[in-house]
Amino acid sequence: MKRISILLLAFSVWLAGCTSLIQKGQGQFQSGEYQVAIGTFSKVLEKDPDNKQANLYVAESYRLSNRIEKSLDYYKKAASLEETFDTYYKLGQAQKSQGEYAAAKESFTKAKGLTLDDGYIRLAEREIAGMQKVAEISDYYPYMQVENYKLLNTPLAEYSPVVHKGYLYFTSNRQSSTIYNATGTPVMKLFRTKADGIKVDVQSIQPLPEFRNEENLNQGSLVLSPDGNTMIYSRANSGSKKDLPDTHLFASYFRGGGFTMPIWMPINEDEFYANQTAAFSPDGNELYFASIRPDGQGGLDLYRATKLANGDFGNAVNMGAQINTPGNEHFPYVAPDGKLFFASDGHPGFGKMDLFVAERTDKGWEVKNLGPNINTTADDFGIFFTKYPIEGFLSSNREGGLGDDDIYFFEDKSPKPKIVNVFLNVTTKEGKEDGTEAVLPQTRVVLYDSSNKNIGGDFSNQNGRLRFTLAPNENFSIIASKSGYFSKSITYSTLGKTPRVEDLVQDVTNVMLDTTIVLDKLILEKAIVLDNIYYDLDKADIRPDAAIELDKLVKILKDNPSIRIELSSHTDSRSSDAYNDNLSQRRAESAVAYIVSQGIDASRLVAKGYGERQLIIQNAQTEEEHQVNRRTEFKVIEIKE
């Protein structure tokens, strides 16, 4: 009996001690001293590993101090002790932060079955749908490579890099002696060093020289207006109970060689709203920032404010449900082309915060994950382009870093494209009476692209040669002209005349092509026979085969807009003179009408029927001889200057 009394007394003392520690830890938790609370509740768990309250408080302390990956074991224990929507939903989030997607999906499904609340069900379904989309995420920038800037980073935190006018600005808790009780790490300050793009002078890092970092509070995520005269940053976690209760945006203005004392920005609107991580639009007339407000989607949402007449920013509007989610959207960056980059843990991603881009479409915003070559299961955030879109910085606490948040640089390492040069050698010649061809030097040759834009031109040399450089797999037209000759245009295509890119071996491949343009002399009153112009017996209608031949004359007229022609029709001698004259005139007029229908001015054409009065073969006997006499000709009767 005495022994039992002693045991009961020991148990009572132990229970009282646990109760006292829990109450102490609850007070620390409510004050936002999460790291201190973790230490207190850990003492409870040393004696009572199955204490439901202690496990939940440790898990929540890690989650609320942005270390949800460390909460996993505690949520598992809490869920095993009491199955609720909250424990399984947050367990799923912790599992997702570690890349345990199958387990996370199982936990979210379990959470969904433990509630009748429609809002909670939608949250679980959103997470499940996000898990299913992870495998579909592809690289937005396929050849972007990300590397830790080890010489810049320390075992403490470095994040939110911004480059402006030859300097890199960033946030770090190096050189800080005050401890932030929520994380157990030093408070954040603003730093600067010289930089040329992504090349950083790591030897000249110092706290902002023109701005005094305040002691005993966190300052971070600085941005500068395009002109450099306005600095906006996030300020929070003051140790004074008289100070603002949450994170707010403060502004400082460059005056007389330094920045003014920071002032609370009206855009914060309410002291109980959380406001942080701002970014200017490229023209400086808009301010994007993250905030928790009553009109939001859940956690931190992105808002856009406009510059007012007095220089302040106001009229903040929520960016909407296409961008914002029940999770957190923050760390915005607005690219020169209007694309909005930001970090989110609410859109489908790989774990904690991922980097996303929002593109404007005719249906609003389309949000895309930047992909696995940029994002990880850890926090990836704070992107900034030094040369858009091929290089810049981002922040991450991914595996392989120096300890906490680190600054990483990224570069587009797209493979150097293999080049195909297409050279077209053009030879200009003239056609002789005997059917042979001879070199025609000093001929003007002009090259046009598929949209009929002049992209080159020159005279052929004494050998009738000149060369053009053409693009692969495109269509062109070439016009050759010389005084005293019919101008001539031809089409030329490089389609299928170059090797496929995937078959190229050398960095540069030259393809040599050749073509010849033959010009005919332009002689007034010289008859030129149009071959294959046939008409049905005793008819003047243009047959389809005749139209094909007449189209060649149309082309000559278009290539030579200064000439005026006579188009003549001739018959054989097998009918009366009057009949043949009438038939040939009608045929000539029918041919002219067709040419006019193809866009040639009627004033450039004269129709003439000669009947049988200009026979080539007198006393023709065979059908072949009669066919020679039945012909259509044209001759140039005028050349307009």
Image (tube, rainbow, N blue to C red):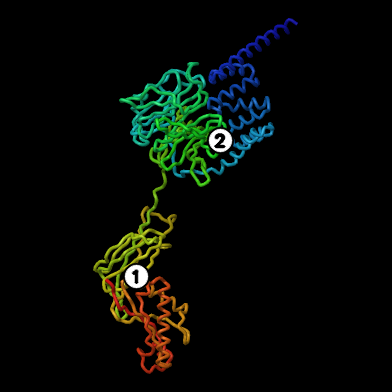
Residue 521 coordinates in the image, percent (x, y)? 29, 76
Q: Amino acid at mark 1?
A: Asp
Residue under pointer 1: 559
Residue 346 coordinates in the image, percent (x, y)? 55, 35
Circle 2 — which element? Answer: loop
Residue 180 coordinates in the image, percent (x, y)? 48, 20
Residue 572 lies in quadrant: bottom left
76 sits to left or right of 406? right
Q: Is residue 64 visible?
A: yes
Image height check: is 200 above or below 597?
above
Q: Amino acid at mark 2?
A: Thr
Residue under pointer 2: 325
Circle 1 — which element? Answer: helix
Of label 1 and label 2, which has the lower sequence position? 2
Inter-mark Cα distance, 1 to 2: 64 Å
Q: Residue furthest front?
A: 309
Task: Identify the mark at residue 179; answer none if there is no mark.
Answer: none
Residue closer to the observer: 575 or 25: 575
Quadrant (top left/top right/bottom left/bottom right) for the C terminus? bottom left
Quadrant (top left/top right/bottom left/bottom right) for the N terminus? top right
